[in-house]
Image (tube, coloured by chain):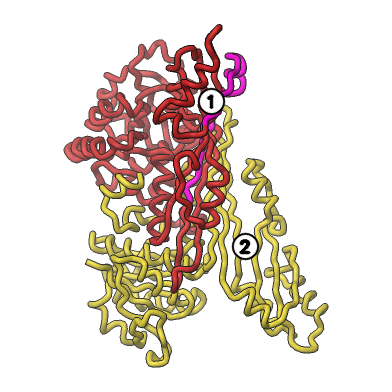
Chain colours: A red, B yellow
Amino acid sequence: MKTRVGIAGYGNLGRGVELAIRQNPDMELIGIFTRRDPASVKTLTGAPAYRIEDAETMKDQIDVMILCGGSATDLPQQGPQLAKNFHTIDSFDTHAKIPEYFAAMDKVCKEQKHISIISVGWDPGLFSLNRLYAESVLSNGKTYTFWGKGVSQGHSDAIRRVKGVKNAIQYTVPVEQAIEAVRNCENPELTTRQKHLRECYVVAEEGADLAQIENDIKTMPNYFSDYDTTVHFISEEELKRDHASMPHGGFVIRSGKTGLQEETNQVIEFSLKLESNPEFTASVLVAYARAAHCMAQEGMCGAKSVFDVAPAYLSAKSGEELRKELL
Amino acid sequence: MKTRVGIAGYGNLGRGVELAIRQNPDMELIGIFTRRDPASVKTLTGAPAYRIEDAETMKDQIDVMILCGGSATDLPQQGPQLAKNFHTIDSFDTHAKIPEYFAAMDKVCKEQKHISIISVGWDPGLFSLNRLYAESVLSNGKTYTFWGKGVSQGHSDAIRRVKGVKNAIQYTVPVEQAIEAVRNCENPELTTRQKHLRECYVVAEEGADLAQIENDIKTMPNYFSDYDTTVHFISEEELKRDHASMPHGGFVIRSGKTGLQEETNQVIEFSLKLESNPEFTASVLVAYARAAHCMAQEGMCGAKSVFDVAPAYLSAKSGEELRKELL
C-alpha cells in the first residue's frame, strides 16, 4: 500500500516535494493544495491542484499532508489547522518559536490522534540529528556548525531593501581555516566573523550611488556588520545567468576527547554539498512522510521532531532488509 | 536515577567502556565481569571485578550489561546467555551471521521481556545509520563506504601467521582519488584495489627471508592479493614506539540526483577520524546503553539494532532541552 501524499503550498519547496515523490515508488501524490486559483497553477508533473480550503473534504484520500509554507506566517496558522485533519510534516525553522509551535501542534495532534513531525529538513533536520548523535557519543567535546557555501534568502532579501538596489543574491561562505582548526581538534573559540564570510552580488538601479550601497550593506546591523562582507556589482543578466540556482550545504563537526586522561582526540563530521537547497529539503520531507504514515499506523500520535523518529521508519525496506543491506 | 552498567569482558573494548562511563554523570559502573580470576584483574578506574558466572546473582543491581567479547566465539554464546538476565548492548560485527544472531537474541529477549541492541559501534553502528539516512533521503543515488586510515586487527593477525614474521601492524588506507571522484558525483564503479591500499609494518625474525615474507604477504588471497600492498620492515622497538595506538575512521558518502530531469547533484558525507578505535566504539556502546535502559522502562522488548532506536533515547537531555539546544 502506497503512502498517499498531499502538498500544502506550491513554491520552490512544494515543487521539490512533487519531484521527490516521483523518485519513491511507495509514495503517491494525490494533489497540490494552494491559496491561488487552482486553474492558474500549472504543476511540474501534471499533479492536480485544489483550493487549500477543500483539503478537508479529501482527508480520506490522503495519508500525510506535507506543509510547504513559510515559517514566518504560513505554518503557525496552517500547521495547527491542517493537523486537525491530517498527519503532517513541515520544515518549521524559526528556532526561537519552536517550543510554542511544537506545543500548538502537539495539542491538536493528541486531540485528533494525529502525528505531526515538525522542523524537518537539513537544518533543522539532518544537522540537528548529527548534533545529537555526536554529542551523545562524545560527551566531552564541542560541536560546531558551519553553513554554506550557499544562498541565504533572508540576507538576499535584506540587500534588496537597500536604497538603489534592484536585485541581489547573498552567499554565506564558511571560513576554511576555521573548519580546519575544528577538524584538528584545536577547539577554537570562534567569533561570528571568524566562522563565515558574506559574498553579495548586487544589481544596482541605473544611476545609483554604488559606494553608498556598498556601505549600507556592509554596515547593516545583525545581517552584515559582524561579518567580512564583499560586494560585487553585476548586471541583471549576469545575476540571472550565474546566480539562479539555490546551492547550499554545510558542516556539523564535533571533536571530543576520550581515554584515561581524556587525551585521545576523536572527530565526527557530517557535511552536505547541495546543488539545490529546496529539492534536497523536499527529499528529507518525503522520507519523513513515509515515517509518519508508518508511525501513525502503529498508533503513535502527537507532535514529533526528527529526534523522535527511529531511523528504520524512514526506509521502505523491512527490518530484515535493512540489517542485511545497511547494518 | 542513574543507569547502572555492567561490563562483560575486559579487553580493549571493555576498558574503553569503563572510561566512557566515567564521562557520563547519569551512568554508573557496577562492575566488570570476566572469565579470568577476578583477583588477577586490575581495572583502570578501580571498578570491582567479578566472575562472569556470578553475574546472574547481581542482576537486580544492573540495568544494562554491555558485552565486550569478540564476535567470532564470545558473543554467539554469551549474548543469548546474558540476555536471559539483562538488557544488553553489544558490537557484534560478523556481518553474514547478523540474521542468525539477531534471531537468537530476539527469542531470548521476548521470552524474558528484555531489550538487546546488537551490532552497536561505528561500523556496524554510526556508519550503518548514515547509510540508512542518506539512502532514505536520496532515493536515486549510490552510497560508498571507505575505511581508514586505520589498523585492521584481522589483517595484522594474518601477517603474523606468515613464516618468519615476529610481529606486524596493518593499516587500511582509503584511496584519496576514489573519495574525490565520489564527492564530485562521478558515481565511479570502483574495484577493491581502487578503493583501499594496504600498508604493512612488519618485524621479521632474525635471519628470515625478507623477500619471501613480502611475497607471501602480497600474494595472500582475500587479505592482500586484491590490493596494492606495501610492506615496510621495521624493528620491534619502532613497532612499539610508532604503531601502538589504534587509530581508525572512514567515510560514508552518498551522491544522488534530484530535480525534474534528475539533473541536480546532492552529496551527503559522514566521516570519522579516530585516535582510538576501541575507546570510540565504547563511547557509542555507552550511549546506546542509556537508550536501552530508557526503552526498557517504556516497556519495549526484543532484539534491536541502531535502526530501531529513536535518536532522543541516546541523550540524557529531555525532549524540551533537545529541541531548544540541538534542533
Q: Secondary structure at mark 1?
A: strand
- The correct choice, above or below, for B264 with respect to A159 in the image is below
Q: At x 38% / y 92%, what residue is drawn?
A: B39
Residue position marked by numbered label 1 in the rendering: A200
Residue position marked by numbered label 2 in the rendering: B149
- The correct choice, above or below, for A84 with respect to A132 in the image is above
| Quadrant placement of the N terminus of chain B | bottom left
Q: Nearer the viewer, residue B123 or A154?
A: A154
| Cα–Cα span, label 1 and label 2 | 39 Å
x then y, percent, for residue B317: 29, 55
Q: Amino acid at mark 1?
A: Cys
Q: Of discs 1 and 2, which sits in the foreground?
A: 1
Q: Nearer the viewer, residue B54 or B233?
A: B233
Q: Is residue B91 visible?
A: no
Residues indicated by labels 1 and 2 sit on the same polypeptide chain: no
What subunit carries mark 2?
Answer: B
Q: Secondary structure at mark 2?
A: loop
